[in-house]
Image: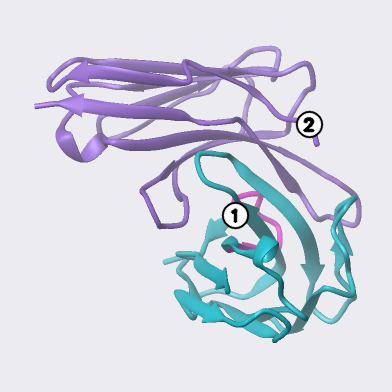
Amino acid sequence: GAVVSQHPSRVICKSGTSVKIECRSLDFQATTMFWYRQFPKQSLMLMATSNEGSKATYEQGVEKDKFLINHASLTLSTLTVTSAHPEDSSFYICSAREGGLYEQYFGPGTRLTVT
Amino acid sequence: GQQLNQSPQSMFIQEGEDVSMNCTSSSIFNTWLWYKQDPGEGPVLLIALYKAGELTSNGRLTAQFGITRKDSFLNISASIPSDVGIYFCAGVRDSGAGSYQLTFGKGTKLSVIP
């Protein structure tokens, strides 16, 4: 149980284009989903928290107009990187939490490369 | 943002040896979680600790939640090559509206020499 999927696993895009990453909880209802960014050899950095049906809460320094998050259902959240630039290249990981529980279950991550 | 102090940063051990790593914080957390991350993958939950002083096992893994709720350790017994990876501790706190965000340690990179 507690499986989270992400799609795509890898994406290469050109500078200036937008990329959408999907995060799905496959066997539970995720009342809260989180989006993280991870640089090489570093820990995970929380970008935003989203509750189903509500606007996402962004961490300080994360541009909400650049990283659009939608959590339209209890099993799906999407992160759209708008007008991507090479500095947005990174490993993006989502996680999901079921209501009433503290544990977060992570997706396998998406490697974004902006050329 | 705030991070937990996790040590050691890295360790090289012989296959079959026991491993110990720990995390400390100046803040109290409701829950401590231990994750393992393989290269190019997302973290996988290993153990969750809910009560101060709690000792929990998962196979060869044992973790304890400090009595002050400000620290935790993870032990791996009889290490095997597939234990290689980065281990993260994470403290859970209520950031408001029931969001329960995680605060991560910087990770312990474990290498096992066959």
- As drawn, A93 above or below A42: below
Write down the residue under mark 1: A104
Q: Position of residue B107 (x, y in %)?
A: 51, 31
- Secondary structure at badge 1 equals loop
On whether residue A96 falls in the magenta region, the answer is yes
Q: Residues within 10 Å of mark 1 (few under 14, many from 20)?
A: many
- As drawn, A71 above or below A97: below
User: In this rendering, does residue A75 appear at all?
Assistant: no
Residue A75 horizontal side relative to residue B44, left or right: right
Write down the residue under mark 2: B2
- As drawn, A71 above or below A86: below
On whether residue A15 falls in the magenta region, the answer is no
Q: Position of residue A37 (x, y in %)?
A: 64, 56
Q: Position of residue A35 (x, y in %)?
A: 68, 62
Name the residue: 69% across, 47% down. Answer: A45
Q: Disc 2 and disc 1: Cα gap in Å?
A: 18 Å
Q: Residues within 10 Å of mark 2 (few under 14, many from 20)?
A: few
* Host chain of mark 2: B
Name the residue: 50% across, 67% down. Answer: A111
Same chain check for tags 2 and 1:
no
Q: Which mark is residue B74?
A: none
User: What color does chain A have in the rendering?
Assistant: cyan
User: In this rendering, does residue A85 appear at all?
Assistant: yes
**Quarter of the image holding residue A42?**
top right
* Host chain of mark 1: A
Say which chain is purple: B
Label 2 or label 1, whichever lies nearer to me, is 2
Name the residue: 65% across, 66% down. Answer: A86
Say what amino acid the circle numbered 1 marks: Gln
Say what amino acid the circle numbered 2 marks: Gln
- Residue interval drawn in magenta: A93-104
Depth order, front residue of B30/A106: A106
